[in-house]
């Protein structure tokens, strides 16, 4: 059966940089982030793009899904895709064309920051979450990524994932808004706490006598629990902001 070509918009805003006259757009597709309701919820799993990357598929970067406005492609190295723990990172070195100038300027000025990707589903699982059907994209064939998307393929997915420093704020807010946490919610919150901890400056531990090792271990555990407690308090404030 032929798989239907699908598109999704991601609301993590692309960034731009210029180095030695070379202009680059950088985008991000998050993993393990629950989409807005589309008749079902959807998660992009960390394995989703593995085969696309392993096959070195010639994925294209386009402007607003327009195949006549090619911004980059894997084949010539102008489009680089890298799967990391939190998502797929996209780097597109722009060509010297008028529409590439337009794309760069639109993102730079914050006028059009839509990011979308087109794919065919190869393997997905299904489940139920909060009484609603959930799709887990285990493997997809990534065909293209698009910058400067004026009209998303799914209007209701405008807020699929608001990411700040790789932290899915939208998913975090939705989790904290639940009246009662489930086991997977605690794991999700723990993951966000770990991500937040990585943003904190690291300091060298003070040297202490060997006979204080047990006390030090207990103190560290207490400090960690207190830290988690304070973070959770701050995160819950998101609901009222």
Image: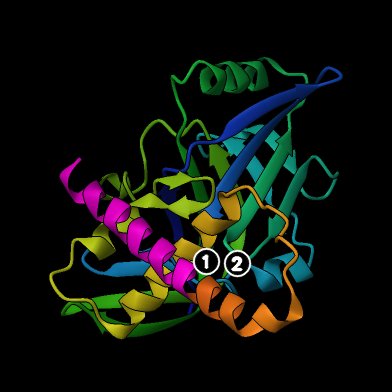
Q: Is residue 230 magenta?
A: yes
* Residue 75 visible in rendering: yes
In the displayed structure, 189 sits above or below 181; it is above
Residue at which label 1 appears: 120
Q: Is residue 39 magenta?
A: no
In the displayed structure, 101 sits above or below 236; it is above
Residue 163: percent from left, percent from top: 45, 47
Q: Nearer the viewer, residue 168 or 64?
A: 168
Q: Is residue 144 left or right of residue 187?
A: right
Residue 84: percent from left, percent from top: 66, 62
In the displayed structure, 58 sits above or below 22; it is below
Q: Nearer the viewer, residue 82 or 154?
A: 82
Residue 70: percent from left, percent from top: 67, 34
Residue at which label 2 appears: 141
Asked which secondary structure carries label 1, the reply is strand
**Residue at mark 2 to residue at mark 1: CA–CA distance:** 5 Å
Asked which secondary structure carries label 2, the reply is strand
Q: Residues within 10 Å of mark 2 (few under 14, many from 20)?
A: many
Which residue: 74% across, 74% down? 209
Which residue: 70% across, 83% down? 211
Q: Residues within 10 Å of mark 1 (few under 14, many from 20)?
A: some
What is the total number of numbered labels drawn onto the structure image?
Answer: 2
* Residue 35 visible in rendering: no
Question: Dominant secondary structure of the magenta stretch?
Answer: helix
Which residue: 57% across, 71% down? 46
Q: Are marks 2 and 1 in contact (CB under 8 Å)?
A: yes
Looking at the rendering, the stretch of residues picked out in magenta corresponds to 222-241
Q: Nearer the viewer, residue 17 or 104?
A: 17
Sooner in the amino-acid sequence: mark 2 or mark 1: 1
Q: Which mark is residue 135?
A: none
> For the C terminus, which image quadrant?
top left
């Amino acid at each position: 059966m032929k798989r239907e070509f699908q598109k999704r918009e991601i609301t993590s805003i692309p960034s731009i940089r210029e180095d030695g006259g070379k202009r680059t757009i950088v985008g991000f597709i998050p993993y393990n982030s629950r989409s807005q309701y589309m008749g079902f919820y959807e998660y992009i799993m960390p394995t989703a793009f593995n085969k696309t990357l392993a096959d070195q598929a010639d994925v294209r970067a386009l402007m607003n899904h327009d195949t006549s406005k090619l911004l980059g492609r894997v084949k010539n190295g102008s489009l680089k895709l890298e799967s990391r723990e939190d998502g797929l990172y996209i780097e597109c070195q722009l060509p010297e064309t008028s529409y590439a100038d337009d794309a760069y300027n639109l993102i730079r000025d914050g006028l059009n920051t839509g990011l979308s990707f087109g794919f065919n589903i190869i393997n997905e699982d299904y489940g139920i979450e909060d009484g609603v059907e959930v799709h887990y994209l285990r493997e997809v064939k990534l065909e293209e990524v698009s910058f400067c998307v004026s009209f998303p393929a799914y209007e209701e997915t405008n807020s699929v994932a608001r990411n700040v420093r790789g932290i899915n704020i939208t998913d975090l807010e939705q989790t904290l808004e639940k009246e009662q946490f489930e086991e997977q919610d605690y794991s999700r919150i723990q993951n966000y706490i770990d991500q937040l901890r990585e943003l904190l400056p690291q300091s060298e531990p003070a040297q202490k006598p060997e006979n204080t090792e047990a006390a030090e271990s207990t103190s560290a555990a207490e400090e960690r629990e207190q830290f988690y407690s304070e973070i959770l308090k701050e995160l819950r404030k998101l609901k009222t902001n």
